[in-house]
Amino acid sequence: MSRTGFSDIAKRTGGSKATVLRMLATLKGVNWVQQSDTRDATWSLGFQAYAVTARAGLGADLRDIAVGPMNGLQLDTRETVHLCVPDGNSLVVVE
């Protein structure tokens, strides 16, 4: 399981530290990410994220697999939810 520090996440996403911290706290609350209990307090994907990616191996379309959990995440967090896929150094919004 890959773990990433908060500052690295903020740097990689280009978001402000305050915004990234708010997003991580929201995602942690609905089990999409988890924070370690160690001194470095790194972050990793949580159960919900793994559940969605595990279903992707069934040959179904990624959007079809993700739409249900995305709707649940939006209802739980009242935040806008996007499904993006990498395309080189960019992301393409799928849903």
Image: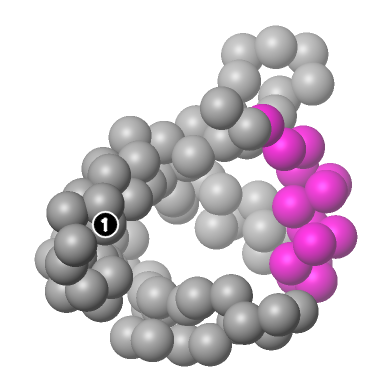
SS class, disc 1: helix
Residue 10 is a magenta residue? yes
Q: Nearer the viewer, residue 79 or 86?
A: 86
Q: Nearer the viewer, residue 61 or 23?
A: 61
Q: Main secondary structure of the magenta part?
A: helix
In this view, which residue lies farthest toward the top? 38
Q: Residue at x 74, y 67 (%)?
A: 13
Please identify the quadrant where the N terminus is shown.
top right
Numbered range of the magenta stretch: 3-17
Residue bearing the label numbered 1: 56
Q: With respect to residue 4, does 14 lie above or below? A: below
Q: With respect to residue 8, does 83 lie above or below? A: below
Residue 78 found in image quarter: bottom left
Q: Residue at x 71, y 24 (%)?
A: 41
Judge whether residue 39 can be spotted in this image: yes
Residue 70 found in image quarter: bottom left
Would residue 64 appear left or right of 29 to someone viewing this image?
Answer: left
Locate residue 48, reporting x and y percent.
30, 43
Please identify the quadrant where the C terminus is shown.
bottom left
Residue 81 is a magenta residue? no
Q: Residue at x 75, y 79 (%)?
A: 89
Q: Amino acid at mark 1?
A: Ala
Q: Residue at x 27, y 44 (%)?
A: 54
Would residue 7 appear left or right of 61 to someone viewing this image?
Answer: right
